Image (tube, rainbow, N blue to C red):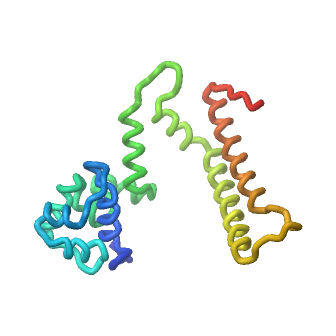
Amino acid sequence: MANQVTGYDGTFALQLRKLMDKSPKTGRSVTQKELGEAVGVRAQTISLYINGNTQPAPDTLVKMAEFFGVSVDYLLTGISAENIDINATLGLSEDAIAMLKRAHEYDKPTGEFATPTELINDLFADKTFYEFLDDLSYKAAKLRIIQRHTAEKPKTDSEPDLEGYYIYDIQMYVQEYIRKQLVKHGLIIDTK
């Protein structure tokens, strides 16, 4: 793995902190003491792991993966082995891949409206979606510049509220895009 970051910002330390903040098995946070007891190490050792000072021995790593219900490769890289190709090809994170899989699992044709997978497929196949993302990214970048400028030099009463304008512009742009997508799928939205 080229350019793997180690230390506090290392992949393993980040993954472990993320899993401890919200365990995939229970949905709750896990203390250093709890994890240490579960895998057979002291809480102080867990602290060393989450701060990126050291990494666990292979047997401890396996116990951690079992404790959280994830794979060892997910702990080490942030991507499970089954999703490595998707990540490499599309750059999607483990969480994004999991959400797409979940949407597919919940596909239940209603006859009235498209299934989640059909909606996602339609969205990803539509070039206007990518144009929307490009425009939104551009608008957000402009807003960030305005916000930085405002933080550096507070505006006076005589200056127009550029930040408010850009926020409103983004809100209206997103709202209009969503409205068009709903209309495209047969839902008429009254804008009056």
Vertical comparison of 182 with 160: above or below: above
In the image, residue 36 above or below residue 111: below
Query: Where residue 38 appears, x then y in whole percent?
Result: 14, 61
Outermost residue, top direction?
111
* 65 and 107: which is toward the camera: 65
Residue that appears at 74% across and 51% down: 168
Residue found 74% across the figure and 32% down from its top: 191
Total count of labels:
0
- Which quadrant of the view contains residue 184? top right
Q: Is residue 50 left or right of residue 62?
A: right
- Left or right of 84: which side holds 133? right
Residue 34: x and y, percent? 19, 61
Counting from the top left corner in percent of width and height, residue 86 is at 38, 53
List x then y, in percent, for residue 88: 40, 59
Q: Residue at x 51, y 28 (%)?
A: 114
Would you identify the image quadrant in which residue 36 lies? bottom left
Residue lying farthest to the right in this orientation:
158
Screen quadrant of the C terminus: top right
Q: Quadrant of the N terminus?
A: bottom left
The answer to whether 51 appears left or right of 143 in the picture is left
Residue 55: name its quadrant: bottom left
Residue drawn where x is 42% and y is 51% of the image: 96
